[in-house]
Amino acid sequence: MGAREWSADPSPIELLRAAVTTCTPSNPSIDQALLDRRAETLNLFNQEWKYGSPPMSLWPALKGIRPPASEHPLGRLRLVDDIGALKSFVEKIVVDPEGAQELQVENCDQLWLVLRRLPPSTTNDEIAALVMDMISRLRRLGLKVRSSMFELGMYYAALSLSIPTFKHFFTQWKYSGNPTMHFGAQIIEGLYHAVDTKLFINPSYDTRPLLKMVTGEGIPGRSLKDATIVYDKLLATIRQEPRLVLHLLCLLTALQSDVFLYRLWDKFLRRASSWNEEIFYGAYHVVQALIKFQRSETALDFLESLAKQCNGTLPHLTTAPNLHVLTDDRIVGKGLPDLLNDTDYQSLIDTRFQDMEQRLGIRWEGEHQVHQNIALNTATGSWSEFTDHPLITIDGDCSGYDDMSRLCPEIATHGCSKSPEELGQIAELLQELEGNVQPVQVELPTNPATQLNYTQSLPQFRWCPQHLPIQFSDCLIPTSTNQPQRWTPTSLGLIRARLLVKGAPSDGLGCLHLMQVGYLEMQGSGGSWQDSGYVVAWDRRLGHLIGLFVGAGVGIVNPGRPPGEAPFGPMLYICPDEMRRSVRRLPSHSRTDGGSYYIDVDPAQDLESL
């Protein structure tokens, strides 16, 4: 072999000689498939070999990294965990029909999982551009492009609210001839989540361009029939599956649709007789979304049509999560009694009484003694607890005013409010309950495959309620015994946590808008409780408790990236038992797992009268 160490790979000169001298057969018996492969090699040279550059880099692209026959064909794609590795995979594998099939296997389901696994530092715009590059490569090499590839592009264009990019992918998908979308449900959910996030950050955001793109509403001089192709394809995809119809209704609500919103709701109601409890809850969630987006009159219209379809009542209303959103609304709350039969109306009153009792800290002895016997501690029982201590004082304090059970219902009721005064009620309650503790369970927002092993070694945690456990050095509140005359983001303890993307804070989907409600302590190996470095905060947009790593649970911190490494990741999920019926489903679109945050005071542009 000469001085050069033997290698299975040819040298650049050998590669060039093979490409130039062996493409014309001198022996007619040469297999035709081999000749076709050699022709493809020359085409690849023409397309990929830059003038003046050596051919060394072409060999990996030509030979690929084909696995042994025993290796699972999906194994390599499953190992990809960052955008660089994915680009390398595409360059080495997608060179022939087999490589194209491997990339798009199972209707791109495996590629979808890879893209979802990319770190938060990879923006949705970057992923959409990468999908576009992969499609271009497939076409340049004359390889098949599955319609689901265009759908992945639409999904990430939707997350970034890029109308031109979305239209580009949709136009290409339309020409593929596929009647339904494989990832249609994800596109609907992602677009709603992106619009909801944008409206929270910027309530004046104009949704009309998106509405025109989806339904055609607002396009002058064109009939809706000609302009609704996106909506029609989404509707065909969900195939009347109730859960997906509800997502589409929420999207139309956020986009301020009128014609198509009513049309889809009326169509949805035709099957109300077959609904189960969860579907009714979903319908009430749509009504709550209407209230959230300042459409209370439409919300009442929807409830009226639902009651008419259900024989003059609203089934399962009194057990629906976040019922207070309906009852507290001025227009909907006033109209609710007329939409319920006597039994459901009585149940609604009982439910509201129980909510008020929880927020007052009143506990009743046993389910069958409600409103008959009361005690602060059910172990001691009876009215003797109230000797020299009235049930409710003239100042509004009640016998259970220092009970921790008041806090979760108050946070669940007012934590997502746009009113500084209602958020201030939570702040005042935190001041009253300071010194109490509550054991809590935490969940890590990580890959389920790794979460189990990690959870087994987690310490015990407890929640210590406190108003303003941390303050930022650039927005300190002057020490004063007087209650602030007017609530501000600083005095309310509002925090903004923005994902760091390439070192800069991003206001995209990973931005958290939080209210401090205490700090988290953990029990060390010696049994003593110590600061965990996490504050307990309520997500004002999504409606759930989290633990956010800020470096110290109590004290003054600098705005920016928290110092040190978070021992359990930057964020923990906390769900006390009292909140399991009121917390909302965690979204799957923000890709916040494992990211680093820039924390500072939230300017809270969503709040009223600030």
Image (cartoon, rainbow, N blue to C red):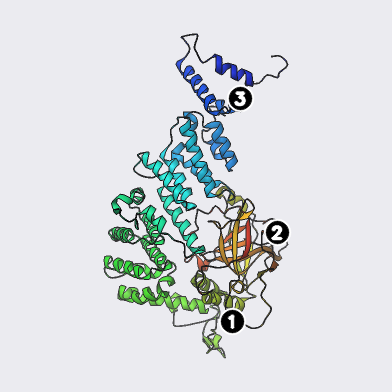
The vertical placement of 199 against 22, above or below, is: below
- Give the spatial CA distance, label 2 vs label 1: 34 Å
* Residue designated by label 3: 55
Please state the horizontal and vertical placement of residue 516, each as a whole percent of the image: 60, 69
Instruction: Tell me if 353 is positioned left or right of 274 in this view.
Output: right
Q: Residue at x 46, y 36 (%)?
A: 105
The vertical placement of 398 against 109, above or below, is: below
* Mark carried by residue 267: none
Please state the horizontal and vertical placement of residue 601, each as a whole percent of the image: 61, 67
Q: Is residue 450 visible?
A: yes
- Give the spatial CA distance, label 1 vs label 3: 74 Å
Q: Residue at x 66, y 60 (%)?
A: 560
Please state the horizontal and vertical placement of residue 115, each as a whole percent of the image: 52, 45
Which quadrant of the view contains residue 459?
A: bottom right
Point out the tag, 2 or 3, that comes first from the N-terminus. 3
Q: Give the quadrant of the C terminus.
A: bottom right
Instruction: Tell me if 285 is positioned left or right of 606 in this view.
Output: left
Residue type of the residue flagged with mark 3 = Pro
Instruction: Tell me if 505 is positioned left or right of 264 in this view.
Output: right
* Residue designated by label 1: 485
Point out the tag, 1 or 3, that comes first from the N-terminus. 3
Q: Residue at x 61, y 77 (%)?
A: 431
Furthest residue to the top? 27
Residue type of the residue flagged with mark 1 = Gln
Q: Mark 1, mark 3: which one is toward the viewer?
A: 3
Which quadrant of the view contains residue 571?
A: bottom right
SS of the residue at dot 2? Answer: loop
Q: Mark 2, mark 3: which one is toward the viewer?
A: 3
Q: Give the quadrant of the N terminus.
A: top right
* Residue designated by label 2: 563
